[in-house]
Image (cartoon, rainbow, N blue to C red):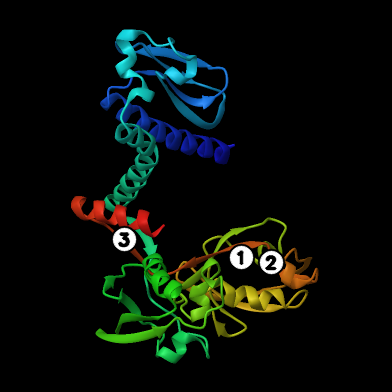
Amino acid sequence: MTTLIAFLFALALLIFVHELGHYSVARWCGVKVLRFSIGFGTPLLRWTVGADRTEWTISPIPLGGYVRMLDEREGGPGSVAENELHRAFNRQSLGKRAAIVVAGPLANFALAIALYASLGMVGIEEPAAVLARPAAGTQADAAGIAAGDRVVSIDGREVRSLPDLRLRLIDAVVEQRAARLVVRRDGAPLQIALDTRGLASGEIEKDFMRTLGLELAGGSVSIGSVLPDGSAAKAGLLAGDEVVSVEGRAVTRATDLIDVLRVSADREVPLTIRRAGVEQRIVVVPQAQRSDRAEDGGRSVGRIGAALQNKVEMVRVVHGPIDAIGYGARQTWDM
């Protein structure tokens, strides 16, 4: 229900702003507006506003809206009073009619810029652009990317976070060329050329970052929640426990633990956890459960009935009021 309400609210906001663009420019051009409707169908609510008695309505089908303007084409010749002909949409110049039509989409672009700018001023918590050791044979490995490298710019454009890194790389991936990265390693800047050529067609729609070998540096892994009847609960794991190691191997990302548990159904798996600053050893026995992932082919895998949380280095990206407008425009363009 929350998702549905959020979707309808977002849709209503987009429709309102879009139609408001048409309405505002129509009024500015001197066109008489008869009705402003959010939604289609028989109006649920209606009221009139202004000297023109413009009818504002809310209708039950929330898949769009419309602005109805005075227009001779609706009622035919003689349908518009002589003294109002100059206010009919069809009597306006081509430039004015074009401006009224394009105002709706432009209003939505303006809304996107305003929302991104607002987020930029408030500040957004995002993963830092700190990279893990790239997989052997990837472009990042060939370029010389090392574990712990922090990307600070791509092709001269500042990179503040991992989402920034992905967005800045899109141009190079689309153009099949090398991207000029500046990374900070051991406190010193280092220039690296990352060749993005050779990616398969359509890779940009997939996880091209991983294909290039650019993965987020690991952090810590904690237990987020525990199912009461799962093997994690039976072993004594609690929400908030930090998993330090599995079978003696360090755990820096959730997949380090998941990969071991998946192939360890019905056998003991020793974990080292940290609880309230104290390390302790816990043995968990993953339960065999049928996997719904296509790549598992219907086989059973080990699961412990617990949600995991990756905790990586985060940065708060904040923009000043003027810079935020530019940020909003760039994000809208990139998206």
Left or right: residue 181 compared with residue 222: left
Q: Position of residue 64 (x, y in %)?
A: 51, 32
Give the residue drawn at x 31%, y 70%: 159
List the residue tagged with mark 1: 237
**Residue 316's disc number:** 3
Question: Mark 1 near mark 2, Cβ–Cβ under 8 Å?
Answer: yes
Give the residue drawn at x 31%, y 52%: 328
| Residue nearest the viewer, comparing 234 with 17 | 17
List the residue tagged with mark 2: 304
Quadrant location of the C terminus in the rendered image: bottom left
Label 2 crowd bin: few (<14), some (14–19), many (20+), radius 10 Å: many
Nearer the observer: mark 1 or 3; the answer is 3
Q: Position of residue 243 (x, y in %)?
A: 54, 73
Tell me the element at label 3.
strand
Judged from this view, the residue extending furthest toward the front is: 77
Where residue 31 sits, quadrant-wise, is top left
Question: Mark 3 near mark 2, Cβ–Cβ under 8 Å?
Answer: no
Q: What amino acid type is highlighted by mark number 3?
A: Arg
Q: Is residue 188 above or below residue 215?
A: below
Count the labels in the image. 3
Tell me the element at label 2.
loop
